[in-house]
Structures are given as C-alpha cells and as structure tokens.
Image (cartoon, helix red, strand yellow):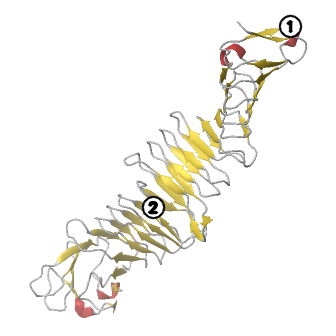
Amino acid sequence: MPKILNTNGNSIINVKAWFETFDIIRYSASELDRDVALSIIDRGRIDLSSELGTVAVSVSASAKGNTLITGAGDDILAGGVSNDTLVGRLGADFMLGGKGDDTYVVDALDTVAEVANEGTDTVRSSVRWELGDNIENLTLTGDAKINGFGNELANILTGNSNYNYLNGFGGRDTLIGGGFDDYYELGDTTDIRGALTFDRIIEKRNAGIDTVSVAADVGHRTYVMDANVENVVIVDDGEFNIVGNKLDNVIRGSRGRNLLEGKGGDDTLHGFSFDDILDGGSGNDELFSFKTGSCRFSTPLDAKSNVDTIYDPYGPLRLELSQAIFASLPAGDLQDKYFVQGTAATTADHHLIFEPYTDRLYYDADGIGGEAQVLFARLPDTSGTFGADEFHVY
C-alpha cells in the first residue's frame, strides 16, 4: 500500500491518480498540527476523505481533469489547467479552480475563489449560497429549503426539489426551479442589443406554485410572465405592467400605476392604486379594484368561460369596454340611454343590462332584437346608484 510520510515539517508528495488508498504517517505526536501538502501529477479521481479524517491538507493538481476530495479538516484545494471537480467535505475549506470549467461541491464553511475569464464554473451546494466574483453557475442540491443568490455575471441558478428563493442580482440570469413552490426575485434588467431584458425563469409544468417578485424601478415598464409561473407581486411603487400567461395567475400590483393583464386562465388581480387598470383576459377572473381604478373587458364574451367578478368596496366602479367586443356601443363615456337596470332590455338602445338583485351584468348587442343577452360580469359591491356614468368605451 502506498504511504505518504510527513517527517519534520510539511511534506510535499507527488501522488499518482491511480492510488486508491493512502496512509498518513506522522513522525511524532508533536507533528500533528502540521499540514500535509499533496501535488497531483496524474489525471483522475483522488479521494482522501476516509484516510485524512480531520487532518488538514493542501492539494493541488498539475494535470488535466481531476476530481479532488478531502476530509474533515480545513483544507486547501487547487485545480489545474482543465475542468476540475473540488470536493471539500467537512471543514472550512478554501477552493481555487484555476483555468477550465470547474465544479465546486461546498458546505456552509467553505470559500470558493475564481479568476476572471478562466472558464464557466459551477458551485453545487446543499446550503444557502451566494456566488462570489467570477463564478457563473449555482446548483442547489439535497432536499432542504434553501436560497441561492447570483452575482453580476449572467448566472444560471438551479433549485433543488424543495422550496427555493432564487435571486440572480446583476446580469441576465437564468433561474431554474425544482419541483416545489419557488420564489424568484427580478431586481434588475440587462441591456441586450438596445432592449432591456429581464432574467429568464424556467419552470416545469405542475412543479409547484411559483411566485415572481419584480421591482418597478428596474428601467423596464412591463414584465411578461414566464411559462409555468403562477404568481407575481410588484414590490415598489413605480409605474409598472404585468402580463400573465395561460395559467391561473395571482397578480398583485403596487401603490404605483399598474396595468395588470391576466390573459388566459382563471386569474386573480389585485390593484392598489387609484389609477390601476385590471384586465382579466379570458377565463373566469376575480378583479379587486381600488377606489377609482378601472376594470377592463377586452376579450370575446362567453357566459360560461369568460365571466369576471369585480370587487371594489370603496367605489365607484370604473368599467372599460373594448369597442371591438361591445360593437353596438359608441366610443367614449357611456350615455344613459344605453344602460338599464332590470332583467332585460326594453328599448333597442339598451345594450348593458344590470340585474341589481343578482349583481349580474349583461351585454345585449341589439337591445329588444332577437339576440340573447350575454353575461360577462358579476358586481357584488355595487349599490343602487350604479349606472351609465361608470362605463367608458375605448
């Protein structure tokens, strides 16, 4: 069996990668506080974890493509000129990859260092981790609830199978969720070919209920929700727009002016500003307006699959109707002759019918003609004063 001998002082031993086991031999008990330094001169996997125990070691690789694994001491691991994998195990380890695309397997006490422009490097962590300078990617491992943070580079952050909070910070990052309820923070934008662009979020279908937090002061006015992301919240008070996706989204605005569009799915939109516009899109949506905020109807009517419920306990309601959908109504503020409270139109001009006892709002394209009226909204917070002055056709 090969032996590594540490006599008086720290030894430097050249090790072949095909060695599978090592004995660490000390000259005397007085030498136990001295470290062993190993230089790897061949390519391969060097696993010293069981032999070293808590002995601290400095391991460096001079060949290409090594996997270096140390024990429970406070070790120093240095990669070579190619793609290395450094595994510190327990202890407060210091890892330096060098050139090449390196991978670091870390725990909470470890430190990782990289020089700029020396490959695309990845940290694999089962604990909370924030990428240091010049490291591109982070992959969270294990099944614990942990958070991952990027740096100023274009990072790829990948979650594990549990809940993760992922924040790429600067750069155009790619945030990849795992199989649970993940939380993504989009705190900046990146200028790509003259256009400000958000980080990209990749989520699998049916992989938890995921939430995006986005700041309104990032220099971009609109965030279009990534596929398979369910929820969005705006975290400051600037003007900002959110465009949903085909899922059942929950979108929360801010105290600034927001345009919130649910698009497909049965969405829930929360406005918190006097000037918000809430547009559920298709689906049976719930719109929570605030005082003078507006609720917009812009998609083809369907009494079964496209009926919105509007809540505004502070009132008055402000309903915006697209003339492309409500073609019988002229553009502008609605005239009284086009609105009636009751169960059906009584003149040819009655195109909007509100049933006060059921809180249902209908559109009738031809008034007392032969076409049936179509339910398109429920208004549980209305009062007897609800009338034509709360509609605008655009």
Which tag is nearer the camera, tag 1 or tag 2? 1
**Tag 1: Cα neighbours inside 10 Å, few (<14), some, or many (≥20)?**
few
* Residue 245 coordinates in the image, percent (x, y): 39, 62
Q: How many other residues sit within 10 Å of disc 2, few (<14), some (14-19) or many (≥20)?
A: many
Which of the 4 image quadrants contains residue 392? bottom left
Q: Is residue 345 left or right of residue 316?
A: left
The residue shown at (14%, 82%) is 344
Q: Is residue 63 above or below residue 179?
A: above
For residue 225, the mark is: 2
Cα distance between the residues tagged 1 and 2: 65 Å
Q: Residue 170: in sight, yes or no?
A: yes
Query: In this image, 127 relative to 271: left or right?
Result: right
**Residue 66 pos. (x, y %):** 67, 29
Quarter holding the N terminus? top right
Q: Nearer the viewer, residue 257 or 30?
A: 30
What's the amino acid at mark 2? Met
Report which quarter residue 378 is drawn in: bottom left
Q: Nearer the viewer, residue 41 or 5?
A: 41
Along the viewing direction, whichever of 375 and 124 lies nearer the viewer: 124
In the image, residue 326 sits, relative to residue 287, either above or below, namely: below
Look at the picture and state if 372 lies above or below 216.
below
Q: Are marks 1 and 2 in contact (CB under 8 Å)?
A: no
In this rendering, position of residue 20 left or right of residue 232: right
First-in-chain label (1 vs 2): 1
Image: 359 above or below 340: above
Q: Horizontal and vertical percent for residue 310?
A: 33, 70
Q: Residue at x 62, y 48 (%)?
A: 149
Q: Which mark is residue 27?
A: 1
Image point 63% across, 39% down: which residue?
Answer: 123
Image location (x, y in percent) of residue 74: 76, 26
- Helix, strand or loop at label 2? It is loop
**Residue type at numbered disc 1:** Tyr
